[in-house]
């Protein structure tokens, strides 16, 4: 209890210091009068602030030369938020939300940019730039520079071009992918060898989402130790190995714009978690308060899972068993918002054994990023877990070698981590110049 109290005191002092710095920054901004003349136009050019999942910000700056890029959302005429979502084929769908801060007669707009899995990074950034330009046209038409813009059509035959866009897909929207990665770190007294294999077979449509994933991860740490015997030095090595194998399959059906149902089957092996073999199956149902078509801007989902599984262990577990039959249920509540003022994400999840209700776990995770006002932004996040279901842990006590080499999961009834940050910026709001020297 004394240790917990000391930790709480340390956390409390940390937060007090953070609040002090925040209040000091607000006072500094107020006294300095940051950007008092930043609301005026410059040669009729749009002041643009863009953020989010960008491919290359410098490329966007170089390619769009009819706006002034600014580094503060409150100083902009148009604010763009870019969010990336994965498509079923392995590509990307970028949603660009345009928020008008000056052009009240136009309002907000949303555009999408589709990047195929075969497209290169250069292709992707060109597609993104083209979409940004198209979205800026209504706003540009309301400036004094609108007469200098020339819009050209590159399509020679519209009907032929549209007809060629009708795609015949012999794969029926199935996508297969193989990844193989390796890592090698060598020093005089320690070495690390690791490789990872991943195989995927997915099919994603508006109605069905089918995913199959196989992962094999092998990591070997080799530690050398010099011993002296009768004046001679002998170098001995000790190996520490972590092996993880998993096969996951899921089938999800879109019932309505708000309801979804699915089933999940999993197989895994893990030396780190004392799992020789684990098999589980669980159906699930999910409800989104908002329509799924709005997922790039907002979502609030509630999901419930119930299922059964069997675990076999490498060593006798904490209950003295070599295997366990598990019947459990779990829930997940998750919300996410992306707005001009910032973004917010929070989730609450829990799991409980139905055959032993005293065994459960709860997890809460949140992240908040907010622009207080011009020049000042704050981000905050933390994750807390209450863990009371680690029946897979071995009964034997972990050795000092297990702890230092991280080859074994250690028992813990709670987990907590937190982060926070403050950004204060003043001075010129313009940053259209690209200079990457040195």
Image: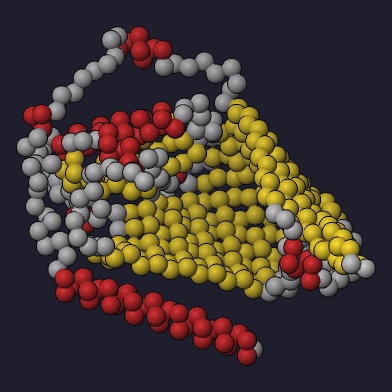
Please tell me whether residue 416 is drawn above or below residue 340 in the rendered image: below
**At which x and y percent is residue 437?**
33, 43
> What x and y, as percent, mark residue 423?
33, 64
Residue 165 sits in quarter: top left
**Percent x, y of residue 106:** 17, 42
Image point (10%, 38%), residue name? 142
Q: In the depicted view, which residue is nearer to us: 218 or 106?
A: 218
Q: Residue at x 60, y 27 (%)?
A: 174
Most extreme residue toward the bottom is: 2
Quarter holding the N terminus? bottom right
Vertical relation: 264 (above or below) 232: above
Q: Position of residue 125 (x, y in %)?
A: 38, 33
Would residue 290 appear left or right of 414 to someone viewing this image?
A: left
Q: How many marks?
A: 0
Q: Quadrant of residue 161?
A: top left
Residue at image x 68%, y 50%? 185
User: What residue occupies the far right of the structure in this picture?
Assistant: 230
In the image, is residue 274 above or below residue 5?
above
- Horizontal side, residue 20 vs residue 135: left or right: right
Kindly tell me whether residue 168 is visible in this rendering.
Answer: yes
Residue at point 47%, 27% (across, down): 119
């Amino acid at each position: 209890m004394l240790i917990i109290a000391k930790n709480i005191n340390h956390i409390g002092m940390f937060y007090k210091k953070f609040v002090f710095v925040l209040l000091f920054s607000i006072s500094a901004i107020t006294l300095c009068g940051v950007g008092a003349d930043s609301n005026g136009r410059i040669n009729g050019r749009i002041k643009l602030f863009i953020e989010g999942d960008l491919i290359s910000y410098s490329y966007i700056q170089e390619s769009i030369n009819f706006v002034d890029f600014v580094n503060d959302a409150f100083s902009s005429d148009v604010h763009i938020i870019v969010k990336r979502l994965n498509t079923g084929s392995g590509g990307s769908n970028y949603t660009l939300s345009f928020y008008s801060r000056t052009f009240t007669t136009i309002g907000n707009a949303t555009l999408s940019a589709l990047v195929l899995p075969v497209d290169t990074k250069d292709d992707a950034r060109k597609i993104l730039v083209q979409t940004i330009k198209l979205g800026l046209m209504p706003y540009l038409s309301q400036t004094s520079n609108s007469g200098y813009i020339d819009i050209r059509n590159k399509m020679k035959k519209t009907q032929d071009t549209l007809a060629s866009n009708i795609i015949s897909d012999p794969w029926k929207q199935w996508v297969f992918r193989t990844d193989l990665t390796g890592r090698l770190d060598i020093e005089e007294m320690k070495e690390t060898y690791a490789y990872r294999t991943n195989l995927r077979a997915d099919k994603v449509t508006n109605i069905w989402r089918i995913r199959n994933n196989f992962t094999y991860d092998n990591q070997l740490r080799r530690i050398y130790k010099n011993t002296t015997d009768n004046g001679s030095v002998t170098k001995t090595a000790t190996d520490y190995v972590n092996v993880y194998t998993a096969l996951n399959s899921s089938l999800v059906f879109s019932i309505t714009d708000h309801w979804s149902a699915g089933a999940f089957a999993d197989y895994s092996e893990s030396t780190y978690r004392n799992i020789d073999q684990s098999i589980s199956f669980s159906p699930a149902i999910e409800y989104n308060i908002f329509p799924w078509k709005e997922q790039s801007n907002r979502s609030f989902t509630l999901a419930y899972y119930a299922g059964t599984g069997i675990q076999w262990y490498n060593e006798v577990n904490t209950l003295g068993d070599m295997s366990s039959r598990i019947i459990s249920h779990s829930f997940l509540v998750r919300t996410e918002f992306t707005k001009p003022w910032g973004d917010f994400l929070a989730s609450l999840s829990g799991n409980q054994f139905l055959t032993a209700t005293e065994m459960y776990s709860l997890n809460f995770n949140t992240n908040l990023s907010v622009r207080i006002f011009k020049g000042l932004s704050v981000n905050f996040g933390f994750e807390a877990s209450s863990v009371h279901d680690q029946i897979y842990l071995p009964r034997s006590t972990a050795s000092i070698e297990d702890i230092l080499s991280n080859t074994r999961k250690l028992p813990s009834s709670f987990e907590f981590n937190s982060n926070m940050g403050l950004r204060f910026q003043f001075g010129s709001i313009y940053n259209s110049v690209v200079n990457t020297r040195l």
